[in-house]
Image (cartoon, coloured by chain):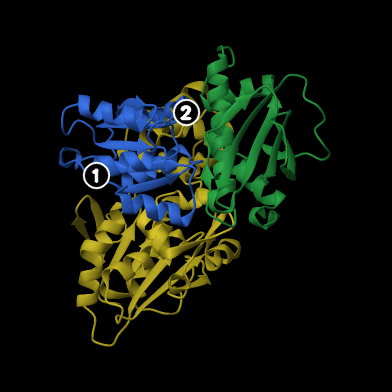
Chain colours: A yellow, B green, C blue
Amino acid sequence: MSLTAESFTFVADLVRKRSAIHLAPGKEYLVESRLMPLARRCGVTVDDYVRRQRVAANPLEFELIVEALTTNETSWFRDALPFQALTEHILPQAVGALTAGVPLRIWSAACSTGQEPYSIAMTVLEQLRASRRVEIIATDLSGEVLDKAGRGVYSQLEINRGLPARFLVKHFTKRGAEWAIADELRSMVRFSKHNLLTAPPIGGPYDIVFLRNVLIYFDVEVKRDILRRLRKSMRPGGFLVLGAAETTVGIDDAWTRVQVGRSSIYQNSGSSA
Amino acid sequence: MSTALVVVAKDQILAITQDVFAAMIDGGEVLITERAGAAGEFVDPVCAWVDMTVAALGLGARAVVRTETAAAHELTRALLMMDASEFVGPEDLADAFGELANVVGGNVKSLLAAPAVLSLPTVAAHAPELGAGQFLQDLTLDWRGHILVVSLWMLG
Amino acid sequence: MKALVIDDSRTMRRIVSSVLKDLGYDTVEAGDGQQALDALAAAGDGDFDLACIDWNMPVMDGLTFVTKVRANRAWRGITLMMVTTESEHGQIVRALAAGAHEYLIKPFTPDALRDKLELLGLLPIEELA
């Protein structure tokens, strides 16, 4: 069953208002394929899913739809707010909680082509003293994206996506038509293949975990499993950063939601059991 | 000084052109591809170019984009998000096609071995004279069934 | 929110304006740096939040415009973003040194422009119907 013109127009309007991306008629296939995981989660067709959301008008679900249709390329400092929270709240708190001599450990899960862990690394360089030891591990299911992430070479179009100009000139050099990230940053991040449905990667306990726009694709049971496993790999009091449309609330209650500016972050309130 | 100033591979020009079209014309998709063989003569051509000048060396390069006027109409509509039925005036056409040459040329400029200054684009019905210049690259492309040629010259 | 879109190509002005309008901006267009200065002078102080500025233009180029805006106290509140095909490392350094706050390289996608505004905290909060 295919998407009706009405549903397409609704989704196109929503996406245009939120992201300025135009979904021209003819892009029905894109809407169908991108929204399929969200619809499947509710056990309905894409068209029924869209109809349902039009009536429900749930802002979180709207955000998921926009997210699904706009995550074509990964942005640097994606969504901006989590990195503001990292700078203003998470890094000072996490560093303050560490015993002297213990490195700060950060895990960027589902890191795709590396923009997120490198953005974290740039923030760390900016905020922490050079003497502070920091370990960043970045994982993804796909070996292909990890290879690209590890090379740290990006096209101009990729560089254009949310990288502050001052960081571009500070941390990148032009190599032909592409931009290569500085070795200093590359050496801060260790890339490794990992499936979130299995045991967390070696290198913990983690003080900070970024796991954004991943949980949305799983049902509640799987979400709960992932969050529990995550907790066990984290230090008590450690910080979890989720996507704007994601939450631990009602799924795994061993997290405390902390409001930092306009973003919510989650703190591992339980013991490591 | 020789062509060492302008060591730009055909693949780099292709990548730049594909980025420009994907970002600004084709909604993120790569619909422009290299086409085997030379383009042949255009029947009703439109041509836009920008120059990159390295004043200190008295040298420069020129990026030239050529296509049929009908194809340039379609490009203009796509760039300006106009309907297929909307009339494209000559000024819109010159402006849009000139800007296309400007964006392609500006990115080519960043590949030159020395910092260069970019000119404003010129749009005409015919390609400029090569004169004392030297021909470096000629890339023939297919965009939605239209032929488009991007050339790079060395200016003496 | 109000933006000044400065580019000698009206094609490019229309593209930039259309993205900004979709995001909730009012836009005013100028074809070169001098026209843009005139538009700023004609407007009240604090009227414009953002200027998107091409580099290579006739009459007055974007870099000169940036320098002049930054020299005028009354225009301190305007965020200056270069939107240009100039993409050498050195050129970006020059623009930042002249006082540009951000830099977007042409070609860009609408979401790249949106990302930059988000980064600058200049994304109007949209209300969804």
In screen coordinates, is B18 left or right of B131? left
**Residue A255 visible here:** no
- Quadrant in the picture for residue C7: top left
Indicate which label's residue lies in the foreground, 2 or 1. 1
Provide residue A213's location: percent of width, then percent of height. 41, 53
Give the Cα separation between the discs numbered 2 and 1: 24 Å
Provide residue A263's location: percent of width, then percent of height. 25, 52
Label 2 residue SS: loop
Task: Tell which of A213 and C103 is nearer to you.
Answer: C103
Provide residue A194's location: percent of width, then percent of height. 51, 69
**Residue B125 visible here:** yes
Report the residue that reaches farthest toward the bottom: A101
Label 1 residue SS: helix
User: What's under tag 1, amino acid-wise?
Assistant: Arg
Tell which subunit mark 1 falls on: C
Residue at image coords 27%, 26%: C39
In screen coordinates, is C55 left or right of A72? left
Q: How many marks?
A: 2
Provide residue C74's location: percent of width, then percent of height. 15, 38
Task: Tell which of A14 and B47 is nearer to you.
Answer: B47
Label 2 and label 1 in one chain: yes
Q: Which mark is residue C70?
A: 1
Q: Which mark is residue C9?
A: 2
Q: Going from the N terminus, do you reach mark 2 or mark 1 first? A: 2
Could you tell me which quadrant the N terminus of chain A lies in? top right
User: What's under tag 2, amino acid-wise?
Assistant: Ser
Task: Tell which of C37 and B35 is nearer to you.
Answer: C37
Q: Is residue C50 above or below residue A217?
A: above
In screen coordinates, is B34 left or right of B106? right
Residue at image coords 27%, 69%: A127
- Quadrant in the picture for residue A86: bottom left
